[in-house]
Image (spheres, coloured by chain):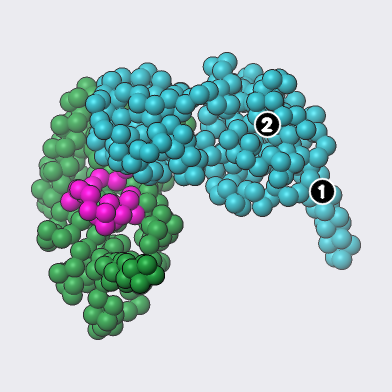
Chain colours: A green, B cyan
Amino acid sequence: MRLLVLLHLLLFVASAQSILLMNSSDNVEKYNQAATAFKENFHQPIKMINISDMNTKEIKKYLYDEYPDIIYTIGSKSYQYANRYLPEKTIFFSSIVNWKRLPLSKNQYGISNEVYSGMQLTLIKSIFPKISSIGVIYSKYTKNIVDSLKMNAQKLGIKIVAQEVNKESVKKKDFQPLLKETQALILISDPVLLSEQEVVKDIFKESAKLNKAIFAYHQLFINYGALLTISVDNPTIGRQMATTITDYLQKQKISKVQYPIGTKVIFNKRVADKLGISYNENISFLANEIVE
Amino acid sequence: MKIIMLIVMLISSIYATEMKKVLFYTTDSNINNFKSLKISFDRYLQQFGLYEFQPFSDKSTFERYLTSDNLIVILSSWHYQQISKTYNLQAKLVGKKQNSITNRIILVGQKNMPLKGVVTSAYDKEYARKTLDKLADNADLRVLVVPKEIDALMSVGFGMSNFALVSQDSLTLLKEINPMLADNLTIYKKSDPVYRMLLAYSGAENKKLIELFLNMGKDKESKDILNMIGIDGMQELTPVDLRRLGGVK
């Protein structure tokens, strides 16, 4: 009997998969939040490595020495190294802006860093029930986001008016007609638009002049005068990844790339009062933070 | 210079001894707007005396603070029942919302789904797990904690999770603010009524502070502040309520 138990234990140890958490930089708060929440919610032994101070040679040696079965990569740097040196292993990723540019193979899974547009618009409509038209500035790199916004907006009775820009046209800063035509603007993480900081600042100035609200994707924009920011909740990403990898180990079906489930909503009451915009009185049910 | 320093130290020591803290931690929902919460409560309470509101995000840290005497704490009724004897806490007030001092916890999902998979919830993980075990014992359900009940409900509505464990209040609210999303959801399990959050004390009863909380919610300013923790007023617990919560000490 003892021999059987021992044999079972040995088989279990032999079949247990080794897991590595690879953090691109422990100086980045959002990476650490995801890593901490993952560790707290994943109930199996894991190894961890922070690669911010390691050179390519050291990272390569570490990965080959450890040779883990599963790698959870946080941030794009660690994904790239894992994908370069251990493409045959199962790789999970999170906290990467625009994951669609990644060369995902069939043994790679992840959690997107962008809030699902359906969730984004549901929150906006719930907080500002009178909203019926929103403008959006995009380039060829973010057309998919605009398509998704349009699809979900229709169901909520919101009209999305989109204006496409490229590297040249973005500098002309001609967004007044779009602002005049809509009640608010939704600022998306578009690389062309965001590469022109002055243009972004001008958009905020212009919208304030026209009494129009801006919904943004990062809390940083609260300082610029955004009415609302909706971003991913990083600890939830870590917890979501712990659930996903557990499901994978238990051979349950998992999605290739999931949307993040938790949101961080900051409502700028100061701006709402200034613009005279009415909002849902149950704001504390919908927002994580209210800026007074 | 030394005399000034001494005076400053004396004043601050007097101030420190008189500053009364109200400790807050709830397993009921994942409240994380601590900055706004602290600013709002402090601003309100300090109109009436040297009071300070101290919210906690972590259960064990909160419990470490409960060892001192003469405390005023706000906590969930479930948590109170777990720890009242250990820390000699006596419940005095209960939160109310729309004149109800109880709420129910519900398990909601899209229609006609098998009872298995990921359950999103804004409750404390241990509380969510124990509640699920009570509501749906033996079902293969795993808890994923999210920041807000609206996140839990949206994740089910958009098919990102299988079920949401939320308060009945939240589903009622969702029906008001977004009926389309709420229409897709159905209640699978419902708990017995549970008391909303409690105000309890240890040591001597601080009548002035308790009275202050009892009056909160009677004007718009204090009602807005209580709304941040999911209630709109407080009322005194009756002997029947106290017996149900574990008896009067």
In reply to whether residue A108 is colored magenta, the answer given is no
Q: Is residue B161 above or below residue B208?
A: below
Give the label, 1 or 2, closer to the camera.
2
Quarter residue A134 falls in: top left
Residue, far top: B99
Identify the magenta region: A240-265
Residue, far front: A1
- Inspect the image, locate mark 1, and give the three-letter code of the amino acid beneath it: Thr
Question: Across the whole image, how many numbered discs are drawn on residues?
Answer: 2
In reply to whether residue A247 is colored magenta, the answer given is yes
Q: Which residue is mark 1?
A: B17
Horizontal side of B4 relative to B130 (left or right) equals right
Residue located 66% across and 52% down the image = B64
On residue B246, which mark appears? 2
**Subunit bearing disc 2:** B
Helix, strand or loop under label 2: loop
Tell which of A120 and A224 is nearer to you: A120
Horizontal side of A284 relative to B5 (left or right) equals left
